[in-house]
Amino acid sequence: MKELEEKIKYTFKDKSILKTALTHSSYANEKRENISFNERLEFLGDSVLGLVSAEYFFDKYTDHPEGDLTKYKAAAVCENALYGFAKQLDLGKYLYLGKGEEKNKGRQRASNLANAFEALIAAIFIDGGLEEAKKFILRFVKAFDEKEKSSTNISDYKTTLQEVVQENPAEVLEYVQTGEEGPPHDKTFAFDVKINNNVIGSGKGRTKKDAEQMAAKEALKLMGIIK
């Protein structure tokens, strides 16, 4: 418990709620005692996580529409993201599992870890209040957001580039096909992306759309928006 508290940078006044957050239903069922497990805490933690994440993206991206904010939040609170957060804490190490769940590699299962992470949020919220829960959540959500924005994991480079260019209404953005090669069933297209007639990126792809995306990606790299 003490080791985990050091990792999460929060010390519980009520240690029992931390234990509940780490207790899987398989452990409670196997013991056949009146042991609390973490499913109710997951429910609460999900809501606290959603609120804090929504506020973070709302405050940070003041000029982005609702659709963008929804996408950013969804990416940061999905099971895969929470699984990653839990792994950073090595949360599986601290779970109370039934023997069957232990045998079936329950400590590594994404759903168990994501659920425990949400339960941990709820436990901090109940024990220390919203500000403590917020500090804990933002430690992960901020880092996740920065990594997403600086990585090449942006799924729509054209839209991202368009948003950047729109900040200056005088700029004119256009895509120009510069080549096409290969047989009809296996073509490769080449495109340049230009701002005010200056080439800022080039790309190739099996479709025109893919080639434009690759050109936009190169432009975003040149601008330092992604790595």
Image (cartoon, rainbow, N blue to C red):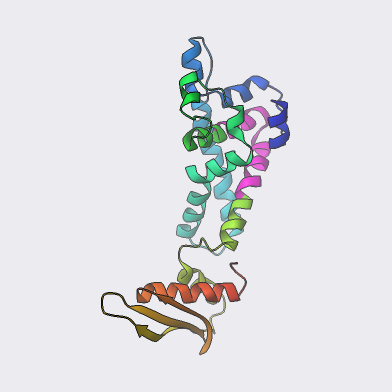
Question: Residue 220: x and y, percent?
Answer: 55, 73
Q: Is residue 86 shown above or below 208? A: above
Residue at image coords 53%, 49%: 76
Q: How many marks?
A: 0
Q: Farthest bottom residue? A: 197
State which quarter of the image contains the C terminus. Answer: bottom right
Q: Farthest left residue? A: 184
Question: Residue 183: x and y, percent?
Answer: 28, 80
Q: Nearer the viewer, residue 117 or 218?
A: 218
Q: Which stretch appears magenta?
A: 119-141
Report if residue 93 lies within the magenta region: no
Q: Nearer the viewer, residue 210 or 55?
A: 210
Q: Nearer the viewer, residue 133 or 86?
A: 86
210 on left or right of 89:
left
Residue at image coords 66%, 46%: 139
156 on left or right of 6:
left
Report if residue 135 lies within the magenta region: yes
162 on left or right of 95:
left
Question: Residue 128: x and y, percent?
Answer: 68, 31
Residue at image coords 62%, 57%: 146
Q: Is residue 137 shown above or below 196? A: above
Main secondary-structure element of the magenta-colored stretch? helix
Q: From where the camera sits, is residue 78 visible?
A: no
Q: Is residue 174 shown above or below 153? A: below
State which quarter of the image contains the N terminus. Answer: top right
